Image (cartoon, rainbow, N blue to C red):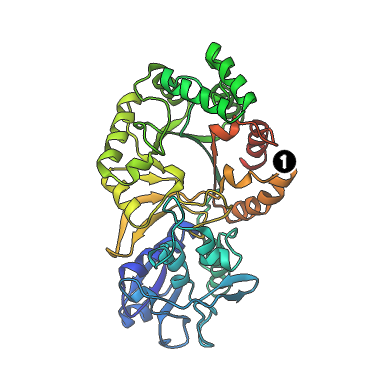
Amino acid sequence: MLLVYTHKITKRFNYITKHLFGQILGIEVGFTTRVEDFIKHQGPKITYTKQPLQNEFFIRSNDLLFEQGINDIHINVQDWEGTPCFFRTDDRSNIPYDIFSASFYILSRYEEYLPHVKDELGRFPPKTSLAFQHGFLEIPVIDVWAHKFLKILQQRFSGITPSNRKYRFTSIVNVTTSHCFALRGFGRSLGGFFLDLSRFQFRRLAKRIVVWFNPKKDPFNNFEALQGIHKKFKIRTMFFFQFAEYSTHDKNISIYRNTFRYLIKSVADYSIVSLSASMAAADDLGILKEERKRLSNLINRPVKYSRMRYNRVVVPHTYRDLTDAEFTDDYSLGYTHHIGFRAGTCTPFYFYDINLEVQQPIKVHPFALCDYALQQCKSEEEVFAKLDAIYRQVKQLKGDFVVVFSNELLGGNHKINWIKLYQSLLRRYYV
């Protein structure tokens, strides 16, 4: 066991060290504030405080893990052997940066508690983030730091052996609009018809008419094709269906339409099905609970996983609501139009609520890619030029590579054949 001595064991310290050593590296770790226990320990040990005790492995601590609340912290990003890092230590420290404090700052989404201008949907803009501004958004820096730290520890202590963690690929299909033209009722269909006509969208109008006579031709209805692809590759796949009342931002098929309900149940027969929460549910805990209950009753199994509409995660409120609604896992943390790691990690983690200074029981599964971030690409080659480097990093770090696609984009008319691209992506990255 690795023993860490510090002058004060806080909730923040306990949280981030267990994530780095336990979740990422798989190393058993213990803590102590007693000097005599630290000296007696015969195994590997490090000191994390302001001053070393003797000549032991020492990391000079920043104040962040021993504070409470939010403070306006000055961040100076520098280079650590080719990797961006911050919270520099001094010459006595065995590593040049306090990776515990730096990891906590990014993983807790500390910067999202600070004053910032939200986008039109109330989201934290990626260009505001430290990672984007300093060019490391596409690097899972926390995992990189952890593995660099591991190598340094192994040079000092021969008995440190990490667990054999394995790379995992997860494909998510987000279904907020299951059909483009079909199943929408007479009023909505007629309104859409005249809207297309007024905008001179004659190709769309023609497709609409074809679907009226043959609903199976609906461009968004690609669920049989997806089922065939997923069976071929035998990957971990999750479908998140919006199951909400009609509103300004939530315009899926009526939850009372039997054809739509049958579709959800049929997909649940071969894949994990869970809830894509509506925009209304993001602002109303009662609606969130009701949507979860309705979907659970439909598929006759617990609904434990969540995704938020438009990937709208507002910390800490979103995760408090999801916890209160009895979700156990969330797959919303990432940026819709930017590839990368919003929380700086490719490892699932439990959310830490800074305002309450408590680890919430909901596990966050950050995604690296949402398909809308690829819309400007003109070919498969351009897509994989963007993604291959990220895949190699995650694979080497034995992390989780989570990608999010929507049935809308997979069924739309674009420069790229998205179904073919999706199949190529699975073939390339699932192992």
Is residue 341 visible to us here? yes
Left or right of 27? Residue 430 is: right
Tag 1: amino acid: Glu
In the foreground, 135 or 423: 135
**Residue found 44% across the figure and 22% down from its top:** 184
Where is residue 349 drawn, in percent x and y?
42, 55
Q: Which residue is mark 1?
A: 380
Where is residue 263 drawn, in percent x and y?
45, 21
In the foreground, 3 or 312: 312
Q: Is residue 211 above or below residue 172?
A: above
Secondary element under disc 1, as helix, strand or loop, is helix
Residue 298: quadrant of the picture: top left
**Residue found 34% across the figure and 52% down from its top:** 319
Left or right of 25? Residue 122 is: left
Is residue 180 visible to us here? no
Where is residue 151 drawn, in percent x and y?
58, 68
Q: Quadrant of the N terminus?
A: bottom left
Residue 141: quadrant of the picture: bottom right
In the foreground, 240 or 389: 240
Q: Work out which residue is located at the far top of the displayed protein and give it.
A: 213
Q: Is residue 48 above or below residue 123?
A: below
Q: Residues within 10 Å of mark 1 (few under 14, many from 20)?
A: some
Q: Quadrant of the C terminus?
A: top right
In the foreground, 124 or 347: 124
The number of discs equals 1
